[in-house]
Image: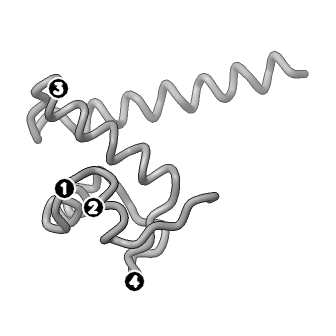
């Protein structure tokens, strides 16, 4: 967790409204590392960028988003396992 952003900084970084971030949270597309203080880390920042790209550039709809995000998470997890095994 190198980066700690508040809601305003996250919204400014991606030119989106707080309502959009709240939607991402309610849809469980992102989970702030501190929900009470609404603080976001570098993983959240990357995730919001990915969601915006999927929606705006590729036209992914809300119904498909969670499936796509879960598949990406699984691929990242498997890639980390492969990397760890290669380093042994």
Please tell me which residue is depicted at 38% across the width and 76% down the height of the picture. Answer: 38
Question: Do the residues under discs 3 and 2 have CB atoms within 8 angstroms?
Answer: no
Residue beneath disc 4: 36
The picture places residue 1, in percent across and down from the top left corner, at 62, 59
Mark pair 2, 4: CA separation? 17 Å
Q: Of the residues under marks 2 and 4, which one precedes in the sequence?
A: 2
| Secondary structure category for the residue under label 3 | loop
Q: Of the residues under marks 3 and 4, which one precedes in the sequence?
A: 4
Answer few, some or many: residues within 10 Å of disc 1's Cα (few below 14, many 20 plus, some between 14 and 19).
some
| Secondary structure category for the residue under label 1 | loop
Question: Do the residues under discs 2 and 1 have CB atoms within 8 angstroms?
Answer: yes
Which disc is residue 11 wearing? 2
> Quarter of the image holding residue 6?
bottom left
Mark pair 2, 1: CA separation? 5 Å
**Of marks 3 and 4, the one in the foreground:** 3
Residue beneath disc 3: 57
* Location of residue 23 with respect to 48 vertically, above or below: below
| Secondary structure category for the residue under label 4 | loop
Which disc is residue 16 wearing? 1
| Secondary structure category for the residue under label 2 | helix
Identify which residue, 11 or 1, lies in the foreground. 11
The picture places residue 46, in percent across and down from the top left corner, at 43, 44
**Of marks 4 and 1, the one in the foreground:** 1
Q: Is residue 13 left or right of residue 57?
A: right
> Quarter of the image holding residue 84?
top right
Answer few, some or many: residues within 10 Å of disc 3's Cα (few below 14, many 20 plus, some between 14 and 19).
few
Mark pair 3, 2: CA separation? 18 Å
Q: Of the residues under marks 1 and 3, which one precedes in the sequence?
A: 1
């Amino acid at each position: 967790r190198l980066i700690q952003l508040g809601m305003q900084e996250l919204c400014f970084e991606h030119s989106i409204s707080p309502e959009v971030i709240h939607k991402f949270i309610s849809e469980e597309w992102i989970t702030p590392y501190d929900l009470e203080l609404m603080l976001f880390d570098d993983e959240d920042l990357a995730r919001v960028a990915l969601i915006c790209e999927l929606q705006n550039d590729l036209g992914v709809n809300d119904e498909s988003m969670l499936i796509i995000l879960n598949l990406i998470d699984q691929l990242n997890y498997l890639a980390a396992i492969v990397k760890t095994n290669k380093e042994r």
